[in-house]
Amino acid sequence: MTEGDAYNIACTSQYRANCPDKKGPDFDFGSSAILVALADGKRALIAGQKSGMVHALDPDHDGAILWQRRVGQGSTLGGVQWGMAVDDENLYVAVSDIGLERVAPGTPGAQKTIMGGELKMDPRQGGGLFALKLTTGEIVSHTPHPGCNEKPGCSPAQSAAVTAIPGVVFSGGLDGHLRAYAAKSGEIIWDIDTVKDYTTVNGAAAHGGSLDGPGAVVAGGMLYVNSGYTNYGTAPGNVLLAFSVDGK
């Protein structure tokens, strides 16, 4: 979907010999595509790209484009990162578009990276959850991130995979918050800050951090989510959290 996008991880590391001269913007697909059945009996293969574009293709007609919708600006760590979710009518897409700045060691809110040095996330850039109509890509709702309030090391980016259950959509953020959205309106109906110390069932010292990568898992009346992700300036952590409706 992006011609000449030959970017690879060597382009951002100290081992640059394998980075192509014309490296492209790194707009690959970081998550699996979703195959859906439409109301008219046809099918669509929907894929979110780090360019910030969402594509719906016809798997039964050589991948013909059914619709396309831009939801983010896109970047190496931007656009649609780790996964979307669907119900019978809509596609739910969280946007990363994280902003990063290389800073001096010890800068408030900065984190060490796998590339060496420290990065600080931009508290004003990225985030938001979209609901798109499966058949047309029309925007049904768009809920911006509530904001970081200039908290050091906070980012509004929502790059973690999205989880949907009937009536509710869950999206985790690099700010460490897990939020539940009403599927019909996009209204935030539950918000939990996971960045804190925990008393764990196995006695290990644990602290929450950024929510990234895999999304929340809902099963048997419980919601499970891992908190903590350290890689590109995001906040580390080491806890697996379990929530129930009644808090027991």
Image: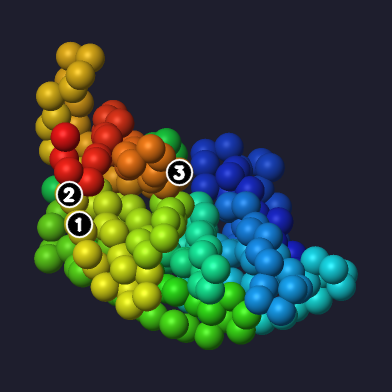
Residue on which the image places disc 3: 214
Q: Which residue is drawn at 67% across and 73% down?
A: 38
Front residue of 212/234: it is: 212
Quarter that holds the C terminus? top left
Q: In this view, does 106 lie to the left or right of 12?
A: left
Question: For the residue marked with disc 3, what is the amino acid?
Answer: Pro
Q: Are marks 3 and 1 in contact (CB under 8 Å)?
A: no
Residue on which the image places disc 2: 193
Q: In this view, does 92 lie above or below 119?
A: below
N-term-proximal mark, 2 vs 3: 2
Q: Do the residues labelled 1 and 2 touch (CB within 8 Å)?
A: yes
Front residue of 168/11: it is: 168
Disc 1 to disc 2, C-alpha distance: 7 Å
Name the element at disc 1: strand
Front residue of 33/1: it is: 33
Question: For the residue marked with disc 1, what is the amino acid?
Answer: Asp
Question: For the residue marked with disc 2, what is the amino acid?
Answer: Asp
Q: Are marks 2 and 3 in contact (CB under 8 Å)?
A: no
Q: Is residue 172 left or right of residue 134?
A: left
Q: Residue 191 carries which label?
A: 1
